[in-house]
Image: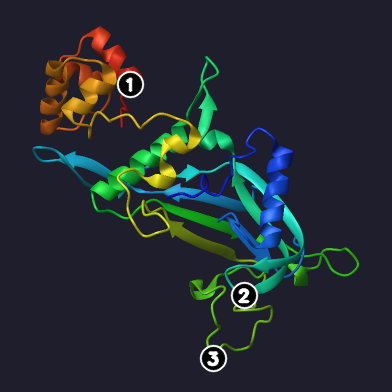
Amino acid sequence: MFNFVNNNYLDFANDPAALELSIKTRVQSGLNVPPLTLYFNKKMEGITRRTLGVTIDAPSATPEGAPPQPVSAGIYYPVDLKIYGNIVEILGSIPTPHTGETAAYAVSFIPRRQFFWVFDPSNTKTIASPYRLLMQLAGAALGANLDLPRVTISLKGDFVFALDAGGQYTEFGVLDGDNIGGKVGEPPPAKRQPPIQGGKNPSGNLTQGGLFESWFFLTPRGVDGFAPPIFTTLAPSLLGLGPIPPTINFGTAAEIAAAAGVSDAVARRIVEARAQQPFAGVDDLRTRARISGADLRRLEANVWFL
């Protein structure tokens, strides 16, 4: 699940130069390559955060029934996670581990470490809100048997180009980016006419520009095919963080009481009230579950209001 962490993005999180060197070394070796890496047969210009984007979307779940069970809310979560990161350029004779070819140029998109963790006011490492939200969305989608969160990488080919032999821009150097049939890197169809050169079915439809898109889903299954009790690659323990807190609309009474330090009676009132309808927010929780000010502060500090 979301192997940004497993791929050691954060080994040098506070040393950008060391992180960039590590990424370049890994891409040049073709080993343990970061997942958000694109390869090209020429050195390209114009690949920036304005033209290369990475987003995560996920279906939304809601509790239903008694006891409440997560089901589809009939919509996607209304906010996509548009990741802010750094783009590392790699030049040379670069192996492409997915096709066994050699590329002249590659770029890797590296999420900022603040996506995963931040320092709180006491300078203690704590889980960051985007990462927390992603774990919640993944868990809810899994529990409701929905599509898992999807990571999409897109490149606006209209703004990406290779300079000519004289170091000048021409329209003939503009990237042909369209991922026709989603088959980049696979054997080309026998009757593909006219042929597009450059390796094993590169992107393109013989028209300059276009949008390259590709995506993958975040699964809780590890590389060995087993699904552990905790999302192995999303586990906060990998970042030196504590366990994920329960949520108001999905946690059990025992989980809420243990996490927030409220009484069993308060936790049971929360579960009973949400069985009628999920809580819309803090005010709704306080009113319908009859929560005191002291207990509300405990809940706000220790339970997710999602």
Question: Which residue is painted at 64% across and 53% down in the image?
Answer: 108
Quarter placement of the C terminus: top left
Q: Secondary structure at mark 2?
A: loop
Select label 2 or label 1 by which is in front. 1
Task: Check disc 2 and report the residue beneath it.
Answer: 202
Dot 3 and dot 2 residues touching (CB under 8 Å) = no
Which residue type does callout 3 highlight?
Ala
Task: Give whichever of 284, 263 is nearer the camera.
Answer: 263
Which residue type does callout 1 highlight?
Asn
- Which corner quadrant of the image does residue 86 belong to? top right
Which residue type does callout 2 highlight?
Pro
Is 185 positioned to the left or the right of 217 in the image? right
Question: Which residue is painted at 12% across and 26% down in the image?
Answer: 273
Q: Secondary structure at mark 1?
A: helix
Where is residue 10? Give x, y as percent.
58, 40
Of the two numbered discs 2 and 1 on the same chain, state the one appearing first in sequence. Answer: 2
Residue 302's tag is 1
Is 114 positioned to the left or the right of 287 in the image? right
Of the two numbered discs 3 and 1 on the same chain, state the one appearing first in sequence. Answer: 3
Of the two numbered discs 3 and 2 on the same chain, state the one appearing first in sequence. Answer: 3
Dot 2 and dot 1 residues touching (CB under 8 Å) = no
Task: Check disc 3 and report the residue beneath it.
Answer: 190
Q: Secondary structure at mark 3?
A: loop
Residue 39's tag is none
> Whole-Å distance between the Cαs marked 3 and 2?
14 Å
Question: Which residue is painted at 32% across and 53% down in the image?
Answer: 227
Where is residue 289? Give x, y as percent.
15, 19
Is residue 282 placed above or below 147 in the rendered structure?
above
> Whole-Å distance between the Cαs marked 3 and 1?
59 Å
